[in-house]
Image (tube, rainbow, N blue to C red):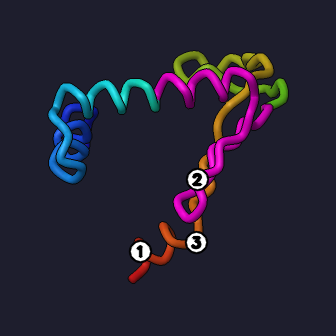
Amino acid sequence: MNKADLIEALASKSGLAKQDAKKALDAYIEIVTEQMTKKEEITLIGFGSFIPRPQSQRLARNPKTGEPVMIKPRTTVKFKPGKYLLEAMNK
């Protein structure tokens, strides 16, 4: 499912116009991005949590040359699914 499909599904499930569903989804993405930039955790009870997670500097290899390359430290996002999401997926 891509963003356009998600907007269409959101519009049909909620009864919103597609334009309003797009605005809601864009606002959600903007809010999540802002919070992740601030390294704030987002928890949606029952659905899951978005957790910013620091990664340390590490050694990797360039796949073309095999040459060792140092990857800079960075922050990534981990999604931890909630209880109800896991139950729905594993019925």
* Of 8 and 91, the residue lying toward us: 8
Residue ID for mark 2: 44
Q: Mark 1: which secondary structure?
A: helix
Q: Which mark is residue 88?
A: 1
* Circle 2 residues within 10 Å: few <14, some 14–19, many ≥20: few
Give the distance between the C-alpha atoms of the residues marked 2 and 3, in whole angstroms. Answer: 11 Å
* Circle 3 residues within 10 Å: few <14, some 14–19, many ≥20: few
Q: Is residue 45 left or right of residue 12?
A: right
Q: Amino acid at mark 1?
A: Ala
Up-down relation of residue 30 to residue 77 (above or below): above
* Of 25 and 56, the residue lying toward us: 25
Residue 54: image location, x then y, percent: 79, 32
Residue placed at 38% from the left, 25% from the top?
A: 26
Verify whether residue 36 appears in magenta.
Answer: yes
Residue placed at 15% from the left, 48% from the top?
A: 12
Q: Quadrant of the C terminus?
A: bottom left
Q: Which residues are magenta?
A: 29-54
Contact between labelled residues 1 and 3, with CB atoms less than 8 Å apart: no
Q: Is residue 5 left or right of residue 26?
A: left
Residue placed at 79% from the left, 26% from the top?
A: 59
Contact between labelled residues 3 and 2, with CB atoms less than 8 Å apart: no
Residue placed at 63% from the left, 44% from the top?
A: 50
Residue 32: image location, x then y, percent: 56, 31
Residue ID for mark 3: 83
Determine the image quadrant of residue 48: bottom right
**In front: mark 2 or mark 3?**
2
Indicate which disc, 2 or 3, sits on the residue closer to the N terminus: 2
Up-down relation of residue 54 to residue 67 (above or below): below
Verify whether residue 21 appears in magenta.
Answer: no
